[in-house]
Amino acid sequence: LGQHLVERTPSRALYLLNLLLALAAGAVLAALIGAGIDWFYQFNNPAATLYWPALIGAVGGLLLALRFPYQTSLPIGLAVYNVVRTVLNALRSVEALIMVIVFAVWVGIGPFAGVLALGLHTVAALAKLYSEQVEDIAAGPIEAVLATGANRLQMIVYAVIPQIIPPYISFTMYRWDINVRMSTIIGFAGGGGIGFLLQQNINLLNYRAASAQILAIAIVVSLMDYLSSALRQRAI
């Protein structure tokens, strides 16, 4: 759809759209950096940490976009892909343990902060695995389906989806297993759950309760590993 819109849109309109997107991207990026600096150092000066950086970033993005002529304007789909990929790479570079500390400051200590941290990191990690799997699909089935006169939707249904469903299920189950194990560590950093209770019992020198919780964690992880392995074998 994005490529179809690009082919039917005049080059001048695409060029103007790229200028607007570059301006907005520069402004948002600079504003986020300024807001992050203000969050750490508490300048309490929006003009210095938000408005002026946004203006400078917008001008910088506009100047960079002006260097490209009409013919090199990026397609809309490719531009969105690059933006989303950059954001997900940035999120994936931050560990869930660091995220839960930040979310604990924003929403308070508890399970909600842990859910936000694990959810955000899981989305970024799975998006990377999913996208690489789509990019590495075999071209043979696609060419065979297209040779029968199938349209684009039929090609996706009968040639692309059957290739990506088994690895998608495998990646999802594997990430589910990782999240179960990470939830304990997240609890030590303020993410709530059994990890937080385990930390409390250790601090209170209640080693009997802590031992029971460690045993429960080991049993749950073992059951989850067995269940995910069985589901992967049945799905693949």
Image (cartoon, grey):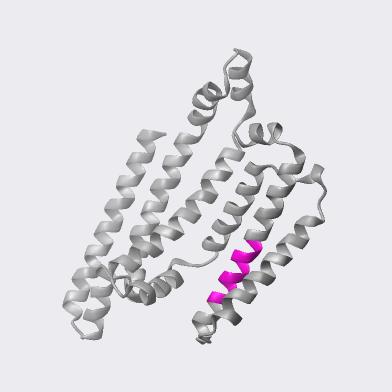
**Residue in the picture at 73% in, 60% down:** 62
Residue 173 position (above or below residue 137): below
Image location of residue 170, percent across then percent down = 43, 43
Image location of residue 136, percent across then percent down = 61, 38
Image location of residue 151, percent across then percent down = 57, 19
**Residue in the picture at 54% in, 29% down:** 160
**Residue in the picture at 57% in, 75% down:** 50
- Does residue 33 show up magenta in the picture? yes
Which quarter shows the N terminus?
top right
Main SS type for the magenta part? helix
Is 117 on the left-hand or right-hand side of 196?
right
Residue 138 position (above or below residue 216): above
Is 173 on the left-hand or right-hand side of 62?
left
Is 125 on the left-hand or right-hand side of 80?
left
Residue 230 position (above or below residue 18): above
Is 153 on the left-hand or right-hand side of 53?
left
Image location of residue 24, percent across then percent down = 63, 59
Q: Which residues are magenta?
A: 25-35
Q: Quadrant of residue 64?
A: bottom right
**Residue in the picture at 79% in, 56% down:** 66
Which quarter shows the C terminus?
top left
- Does residue 201 show up magenta in the picture? no
